[in-house]
Image: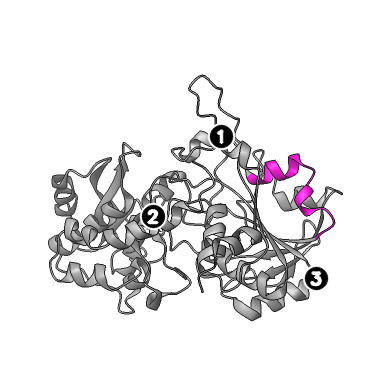
Amino acid sequence: MRLSRRTVLSATTALPLAAARPAAASGHRRVPFRTGFENLAATGYAALRGRRVGIVTNPTGVTRDVRHIVDVMHADGRVELTAVFGPEHGFRGTAQAGGSEGRHDDPATGLPVYDTYLTSGQRLADVFTASGVDTVVFDIQDVGARFYTYVWTLYDCMEAAGLAGLSFVVLDRPNPLTGRAAQGPVLHKEFATFVGRQPIAQAHGMTVAELARLFNAEFLAAPVPLTTVAMSGWRRSDFYDATGLPWVPPSPNMPTPETALVYPGTCLFEGTNLSEGRGTTRPFELLGAAGLDGRWAAAMGRLGLPGAHFREAYFAPTFSKFQGQTVGGVQIHVHDRAAYDPVRTGIALLVTARRVWDGFAWRSDDWIDKLTGSAAVRTMIDAGADTDDVVGAWQAELAAFRRTRREHLLYR
């Protein structure tokens, strides 16, 4: 169901918009950067006053002095925080990929912690109802890729809050890839999974608050009463280090902002028999397999892709694919992140790997189709298409997504 703009506007509140947009005049001083949580706290938690609050968060929900916002809010009498909801990897981050912490009481605060991972719809609404909250808050650092599951935790929680008759508040954080134009293929609905519920681009170029506005307007059957608390002083061209915030790994294999920079393209290697670098100190920057050698890096170097160099590399993963084996491949060295296109680079890496290594294979469960959002990338590469052909095939649907996306942006 597509909602009218009048319906959407009545269901959505964005705060504080004036602070979110830097002054246009060149002589004006830039507004200091603040997260959505910092702006909320500066108001004395006005948006949460008189509410019984539950928060969906993980280890990234921290202040700039790395105190967890749950600990901060629990100690502050101006807000009634009564429950925490943990996503994949858990609220305190103790679980690896594909795991969660389950239902427990948080040792630090005594608050009940509920598990949201792989729970959605009415089941998740029942969890919210059982917790006794009337407002659900979301504060998690995203990395800008459609298949990073926290954005679908956001979607599922918004849907469930609507079913339970609750209000929803999103505290915004920066997209570490910047908020520039979206890139990559758009999900086809028949390929919807927890790594992609709805048709957005592979690198969406949005913040979590902007995604929440998009979800509410375009995809939810019934919009949830939504408040988005914007950042101050963030520009769409800003990379993560421009914010001055500490980087807390959003998941165990996302150790640095540099990992996030390549992830929207190299995560596609999860859909192959090559290692995507899990079990190394450089996940998603190191790629390889037993039997690969320097031919791959040489082939990538000849393409002249902007923003990156490709080094012949050998490594031995400590877990995941090729555990304990020395494998050959490439390391991606991004030297110009403004010019670097992670999705196009990821496709080029797939195309060249298949050409230089006769052991190349897709995962038998067609996981690559779930990651790219359709069968097109896999079938085109199998048919011998080059990078330009594959990238060109999704441009029409990407252009349509960019038009829709533009309506829901908070920062210009």
Q: Amino acid at mark 3?
A: Gly
Q: Secondary structure at mark 2?
A: helix
Residue labelled with disc 3: 132
Q: Is residue 195 left or right of residue 62?
A: left
Mark toward the start of the polypeptide (2 vs 3): 3
Please say if 121 is above or below 85.
Answer: below
Mark toward the start of the polypeptide (3 vs 1): 3
Q: Amino acid at mark 2?
A: Arg
Rendering quarter of residue 99: bottom right
Question: Residue 230, position in %: x, y?
Answer: 61, 45
Mark toward the start of the polypeptide (1 vs 2): 1
Tell me, yes or no, whether the two marked residues, 1 and 2, touch with CB atoms within 8 Å: no
Residue at (46, 45) in percent of width and height: 257
Classed neighbour count for the residue bearing mark 1: other residues with Cα under 10 Å, few (<14), some (14–19), many (≥20)? few
The reply to whether the magenta stretch includes residue 86 is: no
Residue labelled with disc 1: 244
Disc 3/disc 1 C-alpha distance (Å): 36 Å
Residue labelled with disc 2: 402
Question: Residue 350, position in %: x, y?
Answer: 23, 61
Q: Is residue 132 left or right of residue 310?
A: right
Q: Secondary structure at mark 3?
A: loop
